[in-house]
Image (cartoon, grey):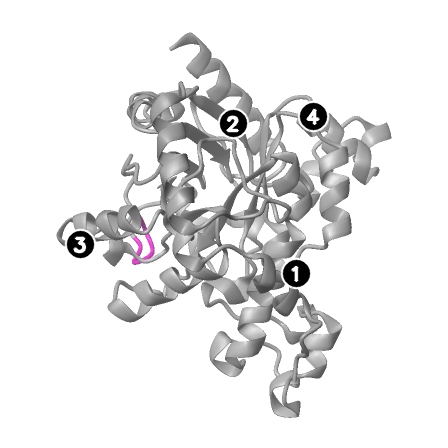
Amino acid sequence: MLGQGTPLARCWLRRPAIHLARFFWPAGRRRSLEECPAPPGAIRHACAERRTLSLVVKKVLIGTCSWTDPTLLESGWYPDNIAKKADERLRFYAERFNLVENDASYYALPDPKQAQLWVERTPKDFTMNFKAFATITTHPTDPKRLPKDLRASLPEEVAAKKRVYPKDLTKEIIDEIHARFWVALEPLRKAGKLGAILLQYPDWFTISWRNKAEIIRARELLPDDRLAVEFRNALWMEERNRDETLAFLRDNGLTYVAVDEPQGFPSSIPPVDAVTAPLAVVRFHGRNAENWKKPGLTAAERFDYSYKKSELEEWLPKIKRMEEASEEIHLLMNNCYGDKAVNNARELSELLARA
């Protein structure tokens, strides 16, 4: 049994009411644990007034979905004297891009001490997005990746499994996982460097009232932060379901993640430039259809693709429309094989500067 001294208990004591999660704070403004919430009505009134009276400065942030991928380190993009130094790598990256997505948080819960180092190693205006831990988005995880005390609380037969799904865990443990994930990001939240939390749902996560409830639960357990939802099942964005999906995200204060990816698979999401929140997000996965679903490949091999200039130019009018409909837009290259993502991110930045 998890005691009252756990992060979950401490965290919930200091969180604002759940329903406040549906409210958007202005772009670039992330609430901190140190902020004392006023009564709900007062918060809504003050925030609405602030958004009405303040001049919204739109921001276009461009980066990649990794700065530590082994194939990137081997590509020669980092100078030899930097490639093997964790602190210098991030500083080098952050001198060239103002945004990065941290995907390591999908495989293991972030650590607050490490989060503080990310704050210290990046410029004041740098933004870091995080991919939600696997369990948060109904993916399986190796129980060995759970914190030691949570792993010790698992039934013996569950702890012995190689892949543990949320259905194998108690509600208390799942809530604790959400709480620790949320608390770990506080250094970035406090520094104003926390961008969005990516909720990337699996192929089998189809459109249904039950799965909508799952998304809303994540919204409630990760209050205040900007959440961006990426689907991997085409049914969500089929023409017959598209309006329903986008309305659901809009009504619950969630960002729709637009994607560029191989088409023709049950998981393929069409490249729709929809905006459902003040923050808009586009993730470019590459167009390597041959490797997209081939078994036995690494993630880097599936994303092994270099965008042609003409393919990036296809997105310029879409990005323009998304920029006009949002307060901030994140453009992320996930074709993280070698230096392809960083090169395409630079090329896209140059194209937008000239557009």
N-term mark: 3 or 2 = 2
Q: Amino acid at mark 4?
A: Pro
Q: Nearer the viewer, mark 4 or mark 1?
A: 4
Q: Eyeballing the image, is 188 above or below 297?
A: above
The quarter of the picture where residue 106 lies is bottom right
For label 3, the SS is: helix
Q: Eyeballing the image, is 291 above or below 150?
A: above
N-term mark: 2 or 1 = 2
Name the residue that disc number 2 marks.
Answer: 62
Q: Nearer the viewer, residue 161 or 330?
A: 330
Residue at screen point 40% across, 21% down: 54
Q: Amino acid at mark 3?
A: Asn
Q: Nearer the viewer, mark 2 or mark 4?
A: 4
Query: Percent x, y for residue 95?
Result: 69, 22
Does the magenta-highlighted stretch encompass residue 211? no
Marks 3/4: CA distance? 42 Å
Residue 280 can be seen in this image: no
Residue at screen point 49% across, 67% down: 139
Q: Which span of residues is magenta-colored?
A: 265-269
Marks 2/4: CA distance? 15 Å
For label 4, the SS is: loop
Does the magenta-highlighted stretch encompass residue 266? yes
